[in-house]
Amino acid sequence: MKVVSFFAGAGGLDLGFIRAGADVVWANEYDKDIWETYELNHPDTILDRRSITAISPEDIPDADGMIGGPPCQSWSRAGKLRGMEDNRGRLFYDFIRLLEAKQPKFFLAENVAGMLLPRNAQALKEIKKLFKEAGEGYNLSFQLLNASDYLVPQDRKRVFFVGYRRDLDKTFEFPSPIEMKLSLQAAIGDLADNAIPALEGNYTNGDQCLFPNHEYFTGSYSSLYMSRNRVRSWDEVSFTIQASGRHAPLHPQAPKMETVDKDRKQFVPGSEHLYRRLSVREVARIQTFPDEFIFKYRNLAAGYKMIGNAVPVRLAQVMATKIMEDFGETAIEQAAPSPPKRRKRKRMRIRIK
């Protein structure tokens, strides 16, 4: 099954489809800070570096499916909530424009839960209508998912649009949640003792990292950051991984932050040395990128950004496997990406089928 990818970023969504057995033949990404990372980790995919607004249908190879996650800042609770009033929010229209022209068998689009806010209701209604009416039409499935329900070790709520071309007489049904949760201990427990701080200005240590990309963002914590607890325990899943090193969650080696008053927390006195942000590699693990996936950047901010904006690989694989099954394709049975053994401990081997 051939797939083309838009707003590809580092390629978390793409890698999930590849792990399910799809062939991502072409991808589009406009952010120059990501190009080296994408091409390094997806050597068999053609990368188009232009803005989607400059791309014509003739530029895109024929494929069975179109996937992508249009920029989410316009819809995010953490952003300005401008939605379709923002040029980034309107990039949904370009995705639909190309969908209408190419008419693949299916499409998948992902975005933030902020799309469900009341102020975005009309825009969301319009987007759904356009998806349903694109070309000959698509049977649209839409749902809010939490990645932690699919063996991703973080609370991460995102909306998914999946459409099957109407003439194929198929409708996508979202996979059922998995009862088991994957903890921070299982995801990053073996990395606790060998992270290193970034160089001054949060520049990378490069090859000096003891483990690839295992370096963490340093610097002060804003009053907003200190307004609530930022620590999850080893036996819990992580907070949402954001596209920001400065706002990365704190490592679970530290105790949970203490309340000073309603909107102010503090580090537990005497334990201040235990508080550090999760490293680039740790947030990549939490986003279920495999360790062999290497992120290239000069400043750590770019590393956190590309990881935080990605669709978790494991969730993408679950969705892709279901799509391939619906179209009679045989998905490749693979172990879900999991950290290698580095200590003597019992590990559960998880397989997605």
Image: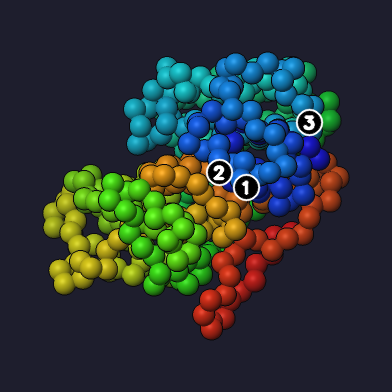
Relative to 21, say whether 166 is above or below.
above
Which residue shows up at 77% across the image and 49% down it? Answer: 21
Which residue shows up at 62% across the image and 47% down it? Answer: 41
Q: Which of 9/36 is in front?
A: 36
Please name the residue that numbered disc 3 is placed on.
63
The disc placed on residue 37 is 2
Q: Earlier in the sequence, mark 2 or mark 3?
A: 2
Dot 2 lies on which element? helix
- Across and down, in percent, residue 225 comes to 25, 48
- Across and down, in percent, residue 158 comes to 51, 42
Q: How many marks?
A: 3
Tell me the crowding category of disc 3: few under 14, some 14 to 19, or many 20 or more residues within 10 angstroms, Cα based: some
Q: Which of 7/351 is in front?
A: 7
Q: Amino acid at mark 3?
A: Ala
Dot 1 lies on which element? helix
- Across and down, in percent, residue 106 comes to 74, 32
Please name the residue that numbered disc 1 is placed on.
41
Tell me the crowding category of disc 2: few under 14, some 14 to 19, or many 20 or more residues within 10 angstroms, Cα based: many
Q: Which of 67/167 is in front?
A: 67
Q: Amino acid at mark 2?
A: Thr
Which residue shows up at 53% across the image and 76% down it? Answer: 342
Q: Amino acid at mark 1?
A: Asn
Q: Earlier in the sequence, mark 3 or mark 1?
A: 1
189 sits to left or right of 96: left
Query: For residue 352, what is the image quadrant?
Result: bottom right
